[in-house]
Image (cartoon, coloured by chain):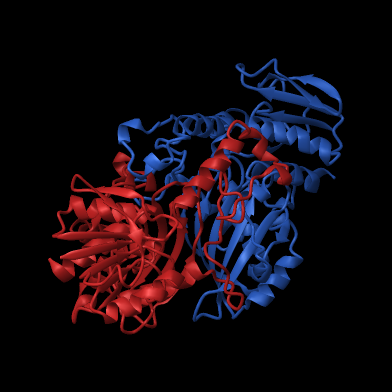
Chain colours: A blue, B red
């Protein structure tokens, strides 16, 4: 099988290459592609160095499956043509997620979306993957009625440059933690990626604002994608997306209501055997998940399961996952496995 | 007026002294008290140095009002006796908040709780202050029906040592931000204050767990105190309390439902004239609040006001406040002003 990785030099692209190797995906020929700026970089795969070429339709000729991690505008320039030419495109961007012909797939949650072998399969938003790995099994058990999500999203959601901006600002502010109790606004570093200071702060804006509703597009993506993935077009869902100064690992605080009563004990039982989930929920022993513990592993860590006081049909949960792996690269490889393995 | 500050050398205590001066509180004699360990420290007030003495009932004799920031167990050893002896005790601990005879007061929200001049007045939990400054004016306008809160709480909520633990861990982890994408668990620093690594992580546990319900006591405090402050004993309220690596400034993501429809425009109008609130909500101009911007100022910054999709009776908001000032020291001084000014 000829496999391409597009955007191979980025944080997600590098992980795609590593995960293809880790999981022994049946790659016969690996084609690594990126922008002109990054072409020429060499990446190791199965002990051999591969040179990254420049992305073009020509370079994708004869490729069976392309795993892509590039921006939406770049994705739009080549994915429809590559798909028409016979390449299965598994795309991390948001360009095609809501298109009726494109699948939007978390393999553990909605593998049925891959029936008919769609030529464009989209990896959902990393935060909604983190939330739905926990929520979907409960939905299957008790019928999801509404969802309220507040996120704690790591800076690597904005790519490598997000990590760099956080580290640069920490470099400036470390040592003056006490003075941040009454900071001089003009002394606070502001970068290009996050708009506000992200070091020692949280930033309740990811992607741009929809001026009509006041939601950010990150929040709107979470709403739309949850409805499509769960096949619940009328799901009541409210979302608040917040960036936190964490390098890798997203967390989501979840409030979910269901069609019937569901207890914490039942939810734990359901999630203990849910695919892609590790239950980390034992208050008596102080066990609960955090994003730094989810970084570098495949599963979402789910815990802090509580009954909403006074309601037998509502639960609170806290889910953490590696946004670069399960939220992106791993999910893409898993889709390829479902289609080709 | 004889005014005491108990716990004067801590992060909140020092701010109490500063705020008494800033606001020209009518102090005739200032008595600074702390534990034996911290006694002897000298603090400036109105240009003069004051030596901190050891806390005792003897030291409090003749004090009209004592502003206290010490732990609950210490508070229990002296507040009931001092109050019985005629001192008005304004307490930041959680020791007396739920006692029927004690007032639990945010002056902008429930000043009526100070009628009858209670001898013990409690400063509420800093996170519920941050939330209710935004929610209470909307409750008065439209009748609050339910509240779902997810918090982003700064490390100074655990006092000075919380800031120190964060800074020490940042010292260890800064420079290896990229490696945190796949951290070696044994290399992650774990301190005494937060239990898990707080640098470059978020920790969904504040205070200990109630094993029965799985809520932390921080979350339970938020529930109980919101009901008492708003005089809504049956309020449906769900809370998730999360520590984030921010030195000073708490944020809360709020989902609120009301007895009648309420629009974003109405909410903005209500909050634009609400006491203790600065509206920071203009998506078209990219205006929204963050905790680092709330640090060092008196008001809560409120923004990100959105209608819950599909519901005309529900809003989302994001509120930020300085947990050491409005969440503690300032709120205490404001209570003293209401009672004595």
Residue B278 visible within the image: no
Closer to us: B337 or A294: B337
Q: Is residue B46 left or right of residue B332?
A: left
Residue B220 visible within the image: yes
The residue located at (86%, 29%) in the rendering is A46
Closer to us: A244 or B298: B298
Instruction: Tell me the quarter of the picture where residue B148 sits.
Output: bottom left
Where is A136 relative to A168, above or below? Answer: below
Closer to us: A244 or B107: B107
Where is B47 relative to A174, above or below? Answer: below
Q: Is residue B24 left or right of residue B155?
A: left
Residue A199 location in percent, x, y? 47, 38
Of the 4 image quadrants, the one containing the N terminus of chain B is bottom left
Closer to us: B70 or B219: B70
The residue located at (78%, 33%) in the rendering is A64
Residue A148 location in percent, x, y? 49, 63
Of the 4 image quadrants, the one containing the C terminus of chain B is bottom left
The residue located at (72%, 51%) in the rendering is A114
Where is A139 relative to B231, above or below? Answer: above
Residue B45 location in percent, x, y? 22, 49
Q: Is residue A143 left or right of residue B26?
A: right
In the displayed image of the protein, which residue is found farthest to the bottom?
B100
Q: How many marks?
A: 0
Residue A118 location in percent, x, y? 70, 45
């Amino acid at each position: 099988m000829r496999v391409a990785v597009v955007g191979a030099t980025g944080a997600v692209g590098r992980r795609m290459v590593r995960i293809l190797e880790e999981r022994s995906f049946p790659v016969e020929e690996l084609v690594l592609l990126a922008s002109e700026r990054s072409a020429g970089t060499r990446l190791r795969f199965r002990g051999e160095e591969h040179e990254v070429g420049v992305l073009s339709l020509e370079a994708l000729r004869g490729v069976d499956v392309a795993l892509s991690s590039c921006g939406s505008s770049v994705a739009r320039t080549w994915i429809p043509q590559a798909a028409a030419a016979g390449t299965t495109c598994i795309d991390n961007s948001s360009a095609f997620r809501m298109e009726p012909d494109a699948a939007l797939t978390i393999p553990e949650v909605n593998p049925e979306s891959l029936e008919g072998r769609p030529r464009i399969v989209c990896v959902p938003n990393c935060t909604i993957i983190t939330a739905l790995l926990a929520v979907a099994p409960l939905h299957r058990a008790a019928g999801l009625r509404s969802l309220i999500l507040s996120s704690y999203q790591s800076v690597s959601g904005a790519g490598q440059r997000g990590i760099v901006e956080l580290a640069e600002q920490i470099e400036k502010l470390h040592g003056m933690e006490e003075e941040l109790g009454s900071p001089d606004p003009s002394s606070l570093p502001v970068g290009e990626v996050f708009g506000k200071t992200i070091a020692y702060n949280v930033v309740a804006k990811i992607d741009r604002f929809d001026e009509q509703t006041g939601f950010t597009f990150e929040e709107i993506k979470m709403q739309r994608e949850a409805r499509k993935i769960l096949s619940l077009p009328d799901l009541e869902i409210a979302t608040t997306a917040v960036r936190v100064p964490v390098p890798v690992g997203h967390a989501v605080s979840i409030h979910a209501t269901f069609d019937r009563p569901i207890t914490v004990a039942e939810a734990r039982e359901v999630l203990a055997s849910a695919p892609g989930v590790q239950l980390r929920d034992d208050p008596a022993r102080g066990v609960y998940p955090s994003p730094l513990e989810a970084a570098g592993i495949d599963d979402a860590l789910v815990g802090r399961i509580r009954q909403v006081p006074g309601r037998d049909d509502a639960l609170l949960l806290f889910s953490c996952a590696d946004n670069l792996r399960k939220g992106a690269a791993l999910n893409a490889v898993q889709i390829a496995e479902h289609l080709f393995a």
